[in-house]
């Protein structure tokens, strides 16, 4: 666990069962992407966490108020820096990542409890009755999209951006404005070109983009940018229009 709290961290109860942890994060020392972890309490009382920010004392306190952590998720090949912190704090929880993380975690001296792309297709990790999953095998970072059925909330890492991340920078003196672009959101042409370029298998991307669209999410919580509180299905359809045409 991180030894100190982060003054810029924004902890928000999005719904009675969903809490987010948002903070500034700069990519390539120039792009203010912001970062976010998301914790979801299921009907069983168990907690599912997409871990993408440090496990600070106040983060842990907020998560523990939701209930016992049973699953810790690594969203893709690059969102994995804090998984070990979470596993150390919650040793009985299962850490589920993607195939690209298997060797990385073994090199750190520990193993994932499951990995999309490495485990057999259709493998269930125990939360699927309440949180659906779609592994984007054709995406460059091998991302997973999740859908919390009860709240109709889509949860992703790099599959969807909504920048600038005003919430993530709301306690920071740094600007959330994206240089040159001003913004990077699902309705803009830059986002459409981005997800098209990141699609290394267009057939697989089309299949999986349609799966998420069929979920018909109302809200979207992403790691980078402001949460889309309503109209998430329309936002997804716009961002992935090149695949869904």
Image (spheres, rainbow, N blue to C red):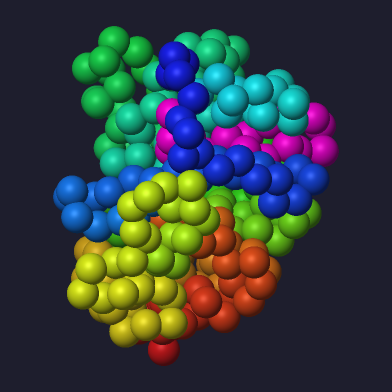
Residue shown at the point (45%, 19%) measured from the top left:
4
Residue shown at the point (63%, 76%) measured from the top left:
231
Nearer the observer, 16 or 126: 16
Q: Position of residue 229 (x, y in %)?
A: 64, 66
- Image quadrant for the C terminus? bottom left
Nearer the observer, 206 or 224: 224
Report whether residue 10 is seen.
yes
Query: How many numbered circles are shown?
Result: 0
In magenta segment, residue 52: yes
- Seen from this angle, which residue lies furthest front? 173
Q: Position of residue 47 (x, y in %)?
A: 68, 31
Q: Is residue 17 above or below residue 51?
A: below
Query: In this picture, which residue range is highlighted in magenta?
Result: 39-54
Residue shown at the point (35%, 72%) measured from the top left:
184
Q: Is residue 98 above or below residue 131?
A: above
Q: Is residue 2 above or below residue 132?
A: above
Nearer the observer, 199 or 74: 74
Residue shown at the point (35%, 73%) measured from the top left:
183
Left or right of 106? Residue 160 is right
Q: Position of residue 14 (x, y in %)?
A: 69, 51
Q: Position of residue 127 (x, y in %)?
A: 66, 38
- Seen from this angle, which residue lies furthest bottom? 245
In magenta segment, residue 90: no
Left or right of 127? Residue 75 is left
Q: Is residue 179 above or below residue 28?
A: below
Picture quadrant of residue 111 = top left
Report whether residue 128 is seen.
no
């Amino acid at each position: 666990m991180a030894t100190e709290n982060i003054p810029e961290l924004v902890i928000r109860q999005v719904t009675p069962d969903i809490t987010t942890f948002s903070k500034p994060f700069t990519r390539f020392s120039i792009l203010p992407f912001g970062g976010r972890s998301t914790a979801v309490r299921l009907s069983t009382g168990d907690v599912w966490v997409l871990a993408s920010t440090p496990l600070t004392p106040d983060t842990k306190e907020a998560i523990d108020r939701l209930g016992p952590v049973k699953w810790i998720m690594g969203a893709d090949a690059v969102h994995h820096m804090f998984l070990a912190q979470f596993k150390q704090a919650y040793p009985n929880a299962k850490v589920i990542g993607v195939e690209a993380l298997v060797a990385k975690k073994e090199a750190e001296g520990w193993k994932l409890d499951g990995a999309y792309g490495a485990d057999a297709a259709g493998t269930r990790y125990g939360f699927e009755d309440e949180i659906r999953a779609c592994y984007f095998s054709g995406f460059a970072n091998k991302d997973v999209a999740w859908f919390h059925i009860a709240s109709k909330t889509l949860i992703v890492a790099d599959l969807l951006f909504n920048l600038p991340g005003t919430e993530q920078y709301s306690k920071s003196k740094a600007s959330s404005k994206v240089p040159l672009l001003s913004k990077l959101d699902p309705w803009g042409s830059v986002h459409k070109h981005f997800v098209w370029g990141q699609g290394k298998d267009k057939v697989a991307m089309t299949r999986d983009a349609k799966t998420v669209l069929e979920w018909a999410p109302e809200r979207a919580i992403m790691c980078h940018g402001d949460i889309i509180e309503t109209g998430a299905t329309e936002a997804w359809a716009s961002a992935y229009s090149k695949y869904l045409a």
